[in-house]
Amino acid sequence: MKHQDYKAMEEKFGAHNYKPMEVVLKRGQGVWVWDVDDRKYLDCLSAYSAVNQGHCHPAIMQTMIEQAHNLTLTSRAFRNDQLGLFYSELCAMTNSHKVLPMNSGAEAVETVIKTVRKWGYTVKGVPEGEAEIIVCADNFHGRTITIVGFSTDENSRKGFGPFTPGFKIIPFNDANALADAITPNTVGFLVEPIQGEAGVIVPDDGYLREAKRICGENNVVLILDEIQTGLGRTGKLLAEEHDGIEADLTLIGKALSGGFYPVSAVLSNSEVMDVLQPGEHGSTFGGNPLACAVSRTALKVLQEEGMIENAAEMGAYFVDGLRSMADNRVADIRGRGLLIGMEFIPEAGGARQYCEKLMGAGILCKETHDNIIRFAPPLVISRDDVDWALETIKKAIFNI
Ligand SMILES: *Cc1c(COP(=O)(O)O)cnc(C)c1O
């Protein structure tokens, strides 16, 4: 079959809820992927940071195969021999006390909303049904009804109401707005350390530290959604480390399995998690032995193979290179580690055309909003690969 045949099948039989770049991929290794015509591309999206460890990482693959031979799913009606190890290793690595495992990122977000509401009623003493959670404008936390209900993106919301009440939206990167929005019924503040989908919006240094202080003073749970920023992407294991803080609750997902399997988790650093009792929350696949085994190896290689340090080093190098070639069509280049945004001026005519040029030259990336390209290659990228990417971007976008 040819590119057009794969495309035609998708268009005819699939829901049209995505508009992908016109490439059909069949193989991946490290930072590289190949299409059905055997053309090779540098992956600069990493499945939205789910393949931080690189495509088909050999150690994770080995674990996946071995565990698939042993046991894949028990449900939580029974214990399994991987879950406790996954919990204890993840807690040790992230300095957490408790873990609640789920599958997708959106499920982790839903879990945390239920948990802080319950905490509000049973511990903080908020009247039943009155709990408020504060979130930020331009957030991205997933696609369920509750989550899109507190999105400010019209595309995500329109036509899907009625929505879940109990959320208050404030501007991102504005600690005073947080302080002003808190009431006696506020149970949590949910925020991304860097807004990835909004276009790699990096807040001021100290914003998260201020948020932590304000939440602490008002007995409000600080919840960081690190599903995209976590697990090495920004050059630290968790992006909260850039501000020297620890959130009360942290959400991770995406790279937690290195791209092999949907695995997410809520990490708890306070006693908040203890409000959940047997029967009150769960998931058939959450905490299954295949997911736990795969995650344990995905976390291990992230640390043992120096991917987090490499993200810091290669990220800085990548940004420097982009800055040195940018012309007056570029409004801003920003990022932390290997989460990089290049924003064009509106007059440049949109970022999609540049993504298409880059695809023609052998780099896969995706525009976010109209004018921003996100560069987020796997964290195993080498200096030679970055050099090649920079040369390619220079020719394809800046004609030098
Ligand atoms: C991707 C993402 C989610 C949702 O994860 P899914 O696995 O797609 O449900 C939530 N929050 C952030 C910050 C994300 O980047």
Image: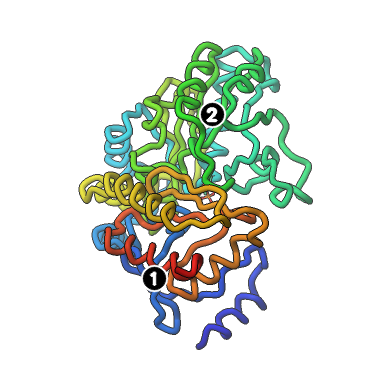
Residue depicted at x 45% and y 50%: 340
Question: According to the image, label 1 marks what residue?
Answer: 33
Name which quarter of the figure residue 120 lies in.
top right
Mark 1 residue CB less than 8 A from any atom of ligand 1: no
CA gap between label 1 and label 2 equals 39 Å
Q: Is residue 77 visible?
A: no
Q: Dot 2 lies on which element?
A: helix
Percent of width and height locating residue 157: 73, 47
Q: Is residue 183 above or below residue 391?
A: above
Nearest to viewer (mark 1 / mark 2): 1
Name which quarter of the figure residue 98 lies in.
top left
Q: Which mark is residue 115?
A: 2
Percent of width and height locating residue 59: 24, 59
Residue depicted at x 61% and y 22%: 178
Between 304 and 235, which is closer to the camera in this rendering? 235
Residue depicted at x 53% and y 33%: 112
With 38 as the anchor, is 13 left or right in this view?
right
Percent of width and height locating residue 385: 31, 64
